[in-house]
Image (cartoon, coloured by chain):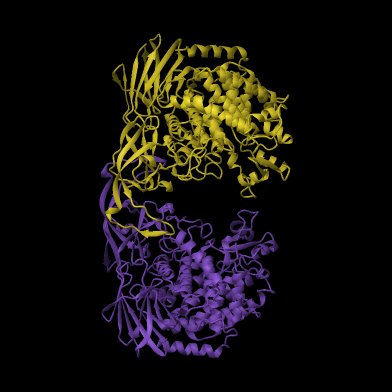
Chain colours: A purple, B yellow
Amino acid sequence: MRDINHFHFITFFLILSVFPSRANPQMTSNTPAGESSTGQVRLVDIPLKSVEIHDGFWSPRIEVNRTITLEHVYRELEQTGSIRNFDIASGKASGKFGGPWWSDSDVYKWIEGASYSLAKHPDPELEAKVESLIQRIAAAQQKDGYIDTFILVVEPDMRWRNLAFFHELFCAGSLFEAAVAHYEATGKRPLLDVAIKYADYIDSYFGEGKHDGIPGHEEVELALVKLYRLTHQPRYLRLAEYFVNKRGSKPSVFEEQYRLLPSPRAVELLGHQMDIKGFYKRFFLHDPSVFDTRYSQDYLPVRQQREAVGHAVRAMYLYSAMADLAYETGDISLLQALQSLHDSVTLRRMYVTGGIGPSEHNEGFTADYDLPNDNAYQETCASQGMILWNYRMLKLTGDSRYSNVMELSLYNALAAGVSLSGNTFCYVTPLANQGDMARQPWFGVPCCPTTIVRFLPSLGKYIYNQSSDGLWVNLYISSTIHTRIGNKDVQLQQASNYPWDGNVKLSVNGPGPEEFTLHLRIPDWCTQASVTVNGAVVHPVMSKGYAEIHRAWSNRDTLELSLPMQVQKLRANPKVLEDRGKIALKRGPLIYCLEQPDMAAPVDQMVIPTETKFEPEFEANLLGGTVVLKGQAMQKQSVDWHDVLYKPMADSPGLLTPTPITALPYCLWGNRGLAKMTVWIDSQP
Amino acid sequence: MRDINHFHFITFFLILSVFPSRANPQMTSNTPAGESSTGQVRLVDIPLKSVEIHDGFWSPRIEVNRTITLEHVYRELEQTGSIRNFDIASGKASGKFGGPWWSDSDVYKWIEGASYSLAKHPDPELEAKVESLIQRIAAAQQKDGYIDTFILVVEPDMRWRNLAFFHELFCAGSLFEAAVAHYEATGKRPLLDVAIKYADYIDSYFGEGKHDGIPGHEEVELALVKLYRLTHQPRYLRLAEYFVNKRGSKPSVFEEQYRLLPSPRAVELLGHQMDIKGFYKRFFLHDPSVFDTRYSQDYLPVRQQREAVGHAVRAMYLYSAMADLAYETGDISLLQALQSLHDSVTLRRMYVTGGIGPSEHNEGFTADYDLPNDNAYQETCASQGMILWNYRMLKLTGDSRYSNVMELSLYNALAAGVSLSGNTFCYVTPLANQGDMARQPWFGVPCCPTTIVRFLPSLGKYIYNQSSDGLWVNLYISSTIHTRIGNKDVQLQQASNYPWDGNVKLSVNGPGPEEFTLHLRIPDWCTQASVTVNGAVVHPVMSKGYAEIHRAWSNRDTLELSLPMQVQKLRANPKVLEDRGKIALKRGPLIYCLEQPDMAAPVDQMVIPTETKFEPEFEANLLGGTVVLKGQAMQKQSVDWHDVLYKPMADSPGLLTPTPITALPYCLWGNRGLAKMTVWIDSQP
């Protein structure tokens, strides 16, 4: 095994020597964590390079992403003109702008994904492809640092003038994330230099005493924090703070810009001429007498926000940035708002799959308990956003309520976002399918494929954390982590068949003995967890859903964690009208669904009696190997409700006939052609 | 028995001699009916005076209405100032206007109810009270015929200038209905003279080539048809047609008036100063860029309307008037629109109780299948509107789909609108109660009490119809009808225990034999109806849900109709999310509910297994005597869903324990103090 950890320390050393030391020593983040000034546990990231995944469930997906999806997405970005846009902007090519006006972000996200992949899997050909692309990007950067091909090519006089809908700051954020990823993976500076130049220009333009501005689509805030963490330049953190704190001011920045917008202003979106004011009407001026910016989470200053509103992806990026700022600055008022927002999402506005955003009309949140299944929107980017946000909440608090949600979103809503073949994607991810909806290879708005391509190879970031007292295991993904605890290099190896069973083995390798605490998340779905160390049962203290096993760990110490997976029949709060009288099946972290190919009778005629017991069964040849749930259900007669509002129910028992039922993990749905599918199943009460 | 029929013929003779003959002989209505020009059967009204009700279910209610409700409502109208408003308007009193701005209508509706009562039950004291009130009204009428105390007293310069919200035409309609009722009951003209003078003034003011106008709250249209039918003055019919046909024109009359409205315009409503423009904002200008008059059914010309929208009571009065006009003019295009509107209401927007209008925000229709139970609005006036409209649809078509709905609305939604004691009322009539909602003695907007007080004594109008070939029995209410068939006086006596059982006996008394057809509605809830005549089974032809028994009927012929009442477990179309996984119980025409006083376990913990059989049981001492339904249900454990979105369901069978269940007719709900109640009950599928 390659000494990843060693490589990481070299990188870290390089960073320290390249960048000046922090101007403001109180803004710490890369120091070992402990109690923050918020009185909360504060966990530290484990660099991607320090974690090696060798997992039965995730490794094949990551490999498909590397070998299929990266290439597939690149080809689409070329064909739709997203890449050529940079050449047009740099004057090296001519032609028509391609893709939506935030098309740059998809190119940056591809670079970010390629970089994560390179960090774990050197590939000179891919590295050269990335570098060539970076050169084309750099060539398009203006002297002052500005770079946004849509504005440069199509709307040169509109720079920064329509922040609500032109996505300059969103694209900037994607650039910064890509640049940090590329630098951390390769140690090479070209894209980072572009990013820094652009960030410095943005910083010179926006801020108190400069120009007012906030991004219409959040993301640049958390990207600036990433840039700060890499460069230790406090101005990036302060700019992120400015953007977060400015949000919700009255009058809205967006409203002020809107009033100055030339009218009419037609722009091309996906081949259609559209009136940019029409977007305002649709999203901010549905009631023309009220400039309502809930769509962009701009309705209140962030510290006063209590309800998750508007576009779900935007919300997730904002909340993630708020968590980053709370982490860096210890601002308790941000954490308090975030906890209310988390309640709003997870107690009232989240699908059982960990996805969010039920509605197509705003790609976002609607009302409490409004969670339709057939036409669930549940955008893949929003599912990824749940992981980003919950991971940051975990780092702030050490509370498993966040890592539990992270796991839920990861294994269900997010994992369903891409096919096993790696070349078709969900933008919309319904919880029920009439057999007329399939993943697509690409979309006019291709954010979801580029989100998949950048997220999957970064998965190693989310499995572990470190704190002043030891190591945290958040996710049960077979992997090896190399890190330094105290003064010693420690390697922890994790092995399991998760998510198919919950028997997890953790082995310590290192010079030892080294005294530290292993914090193991005990998932919320597990009621009978047990732990042995070197074969002896231990009874760990539980803290916020984490079992704490403190000892002087020696080389070859082995911890076995047993997380028995019962099949759970979940009910939804009766306020979720769409799920009334129904159950969803869950085993371990996986939500299950019924899909027609596994069923003897129509999916929508199934009724699960109270007493039905489901047995897990591993099917090695099904969709790459999966545990299905088998049980005995009842088939009800199909009832024709066409043009009938009420009808007497025949009470002959002949209406229900026994039939076998097989449930499939939701994340595997839709890999066998068009078929009916449902997560929520009629049940007997 | 008093010879009611004879009395009626005297009245009819008086009408013919007092009023000029019809100007347009094609506009017939009081002639014997047959196939109309629409190709539909056309049924004729039976005058209220020709029907004597002696029914176990309805007679006590009508008697309570006469002895308690009439007095109660009059007292409230006095105390709130509604009656004194007329004295202020006539200069005989001073003081502040009382009640809402359409307060006159409630006084007129009281007179209408008192008149129906007098028609069936002479009462010199009541008659004198009515006459004294009529004098006070007449004194307030202006020289030109105008009378609306709110405008006269509070907003004298606003006459006809704010038709959308000031209810001048609605009040006029109530006056006309009261005047017709009073004249038909007593043969006295004073109120009719007021009405005619006002109607003539309105006719001189509104119409093509005069002023544009339509009522914001429909009703005057059907009232004008009543006035036409009594007086045979075609101008009233034409004015009704004008109002109906003008609706939906662009720009809306309301929009044109709104633009001319002085601003700001504060008016007092129930003690609060309110900006009249605020009403426009709430009801017509929720999107200020679109003047949307769906609230008043003004969004399309009526013949193009296909979807029931807006304020439910207004819709019912409009549709009733459209049906009246189709009846009088044979306009098939009105009937076609009405049939679509009826589908919209009854197939997608109607409660299982026959009530309508789920939402408080517009007191009206929302979206298809949006039928919440806890916060059902289901206004009593709208339930009455369903009876008025469906009765008129029946008269146009001879189709039992309309009389079935009429029966449903009557026995359930409408009957639930008043307590057995006759002095408390539902404005809002929920289908589930958490135990915090009770009928009230009065309301700031008291339309529902005055609707009850005028509707119940008019019930005799809806039981029978006549056609060219005979008699129609729509409702199984024990009663005697005197009418003339061919050249002979015929008396038909109906006796049953309906709605407690479905055995109906009809006896013919008359000189006979007289050949005619008895058309008997076979209710849609009955699948095994049978008929005998003089003890011999007959197999009648069925036509549109009516059994046709044609014979030469002789004195003392007896028909026995058996309508077996099975207990039905109704399911709602799954698109009605609120009712998913639930059933409602129905027996005969009655919808049942669970109310806590009858139950051993909490109402909201009941689950009805598929196999549960319910047995009807007559409880003589319960709420005046009623059939309850008894069965064995299961009690589920109460689940605390506070701040939980999904939770695993324990699958131990111990969660469900058997418990007896007793269901009460919905119309009897709420007569025993505050208690939990529900119509829809959790069930096993």
Is residue B175 visible from the viewing direction of this image?
A: yes
Q: Which residue is found at the position 61% from the left and 67% from the top?
A: A247
Number of marks: 0
Q: Is B75 displayed left or right of B592 in the figure?
A: right
Q: Which residue is found at the position 63% from the left and 27% from the top?
A: B239
Determine whether A610 is above or below A200 in the image: above
Q: Is B210 displayed left or right of A298 in the figure?
A: right
The picture places residue B593, in percent across and down from the top left corner, at: 39, 39
Residue closer to the observer: A32 or A232: A32
The quadrant of the picture occupied by the N terminus of chain A is bottom left
Residue B54 found in image quarter: top left
Is residue B225 visible from the viewing direction of this image?
A: no
Q: Identify the residue at the far top of this view.
A: B511
Q: Which residue is found at the position 32% from the left and 87% from the top?
A: A554
Determine whether A356 is above or below B26 in the image: below
Residue closer to the observer: A541 or B553: A541
The picture places residue A231, in percent across and down from the top left corner, at: 56, 84
The picture places residue A453, in percent across and down from the top left corner, at: 45, 73
Residue B627 found in image quarter: top left
Q: Is A658 displayed left or right of A171 in the figure?
A: left
Residue closer to the observer: A417 or B449: B449
The picture places residue A83, in percent across and down from the top left corner, at: 54, 74
Q: Which residue is found at the position 61% from the left and 42% from the top?
A: B293
Residue closer to the observer: B189 or B400: B189
Q: Is A54 displayed left or right of A116 in the figure?
A: left
